[in-house]
């Protein structure tokens, strides 16, 4: 798949790799972990400096039925529009303790 620029809100977070606050970049990739009756979905960000990854929680231990099937497919496809939507969703970012600038 072709790499495209994702224009989303700039976020800052304490990096576990660098050990200090860094800018994190939206990778446009989702991580889906389906485990029986429980699903987790994250949007993955990376430290601009050291590439350390940071997973922002979209769904945490929810029943698979709670996620609309169309949306679930978009997560699995690493849909860029969906990644942008979450990357610009201030409530979502704040819930994940991202610092916005
Ligand atoms: Zn880092």
Image (cartoon, rainbow, N blue to C red):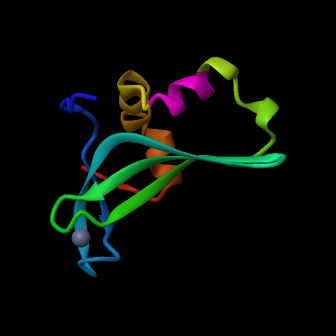
Q: Residue at (40%, 50%) from the top-left corner?
A: 44
What residue is drawn where x is 30% and y is 67%? 52
Lateral position of residue 98 relative to residue 38, left or right: left
Residue drawn at (31%, 72%) of the image: 15
Q: Within the image, what quadrant is residue 98 found in?
A: bottom left
Q: Position of residue 76 (x, y in %)?
A: 53, 32
Where residue 19 appears, as percent x and y from the top left, is 28, 81
Q: Quadrant of ligand 1?
A: bottom left
- Give whichever of 80, 14 is nearer the camera: 80
Q: Quadrant of residue 9?
A: top left
Label tally:
0
Residue sitting at the far bottom: 19
Quarter occupied by the N terminus:
top left
Q: Residue at x 46, y 42 (%)?
A: 30
Using the image, determine if residue 10 lies above or below residue 65: below
Q: Quadrant of residue 17?
A: bottom left
Q: Is residue 22 shown in magenta?
A: no
Indicate left or right for 28 with 86 as reference: left
Work out whether residue 32 or residue 82 is closer to the camera in this orientation and state it: 32
Residue 85 percent location from the top left of the image: 41, 27
Q: Residue furthest right?
A: 37
Residues shaded magenta: 71-77
In the displayed structure, would residue 34 be above or below residue 19? above
> Does the stretch in magenta take in 75?
yes
Q: Which residue is most to the top?
A: 70
Left or right: 42 with respect to 45?
Answer: right
Instruction: Give the main secondary structure, helix, strand or loop, of the magenta stretch.
Output: helix
């Amino acid at each position: 798949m072709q790499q495209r620029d994702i224009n989303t809100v700039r976020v800052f977070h304490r990096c576990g790799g660098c050990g200090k606050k860094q800018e994190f970049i939206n990778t446009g990739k989702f991580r889906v972990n389906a485990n029986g009756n429980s699903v987790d979905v994250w949007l993955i960000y990376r430290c601009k400096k050291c590439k350390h990854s940071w997973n922002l929680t979209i769904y945490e231990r929810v029943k698979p039925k709670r996620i609309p099937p169309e949306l679930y497919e978009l997560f699995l496809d690493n849909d860029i529009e969906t990644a942008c939507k979450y990357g610009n969703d201030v409530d979502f970012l704040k819930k994940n303790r991202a610092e916005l600038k």
